[in-house]
Amino acid sequence: MDALNNILNRSSHRDLVSPIPSPEEMKKVFEAALRAPDHARLKPSRFIEVKENGLKKLSDIFTTFAKEVLTIDDIKIMEKYAGAPFRAPMIIVIISKHKEHPKVPELEQQLSTAAAAQNILLSLNALGYGAIWRTGKFALDKRINHYMGLETDELILGYLYIGTADGKKREVPVVDPEEYLQQWS
Ligand SMILES: Cc1cc2nc3c(=O)[nH]c(=O)nc-3n(C[C@H](O)[C@H](O)[C@H](O)COP(=O)(O)O)c2cc1C
């Protein structure tokens, strides 16, 4: 697949099943992630690869956090949170670690990590796998750091749910760039 078509035809998938990418494929995917633009090469992006028993660990963290911090006691909501990590056979937790730098504010570092996440989505698409970026109650909230074993200068930007797309590929919407574009010449 050529690079431009890979970008134009990527779409997110909600129904994800095995197989997942091999360790060799994931090594390439993470190499691609770490080629995201990165002011001063601070390397703010970190990842946790979650699969197999790790999905249960994540599920336990979600429910403990929901109970202790979000003070949720509705059984249906708790069941939804407990089941969330099992919506895919692999999850990559996308983390941005803020490094103090006189010229690179935290937002720029988070933008770099967002670019790394997109590199992951594109690499997976190129390799024939499906994925979707999700946030929800367990991302963009530093109160979960303690439960995830993260430090206070880190922020979860999202969870990439990964696997093989089950069923038909979602239509890629047709977009007219003219609507979003001004040209100054
Ligand atoms: C930062 C970010 C957070 C997102 N969070 C969610 C989410 O929690 N749940 C969800 O269904 N989609 C979420 N999405 C949207 C999907 O990842 C996906 O982009 C969207 O469904 C459009 O599909 P497409 O990527 O095929 O265009 C998020 C996207 C981004 C960039």
Image: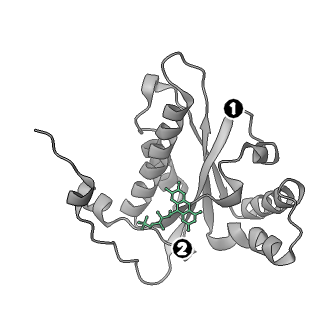
Q: How busy is the neighbourhood of tag 1: few (under 14 within 10 Å), some, or many (20 plus)?
A: few
Give the vertical position of 57 relative to 107 (above or below).
below
Q: Which residue is mark 1?
A: 153
Helix, strand or loop status at disc 1: loop
Residue 84, visible in the rendered structure = yes
Left or right of 70 on screen, residue 13 = left
Is ligand 1 less than 8 Å from the beta carbon at label 2?
yes
Secondary structure under tag 2 reads loop
Marking on residue 20: none
Q: In which quadrant of the rendered image does the C terminus lie?
A: top left
Q: Amino acid at mark 1?
A: Asp
On the image, numbered disc 2 is attached to which residue? 14
Horizontal side, residue 31 vs residue 84: left or right? left
- Visible in this render: residue 2? no
> Which residue lies at the image location 67% right of the left edge and 57% below the top edge?
50
Amino acid type indicated by mark 2:
Arg
Q: 10 Å neighbourhood of mark 2: few (<14), some, or many (≥20)?
A: some
Q: How far from the left and from the top, in percent, is residue 132?
A: 52, 64
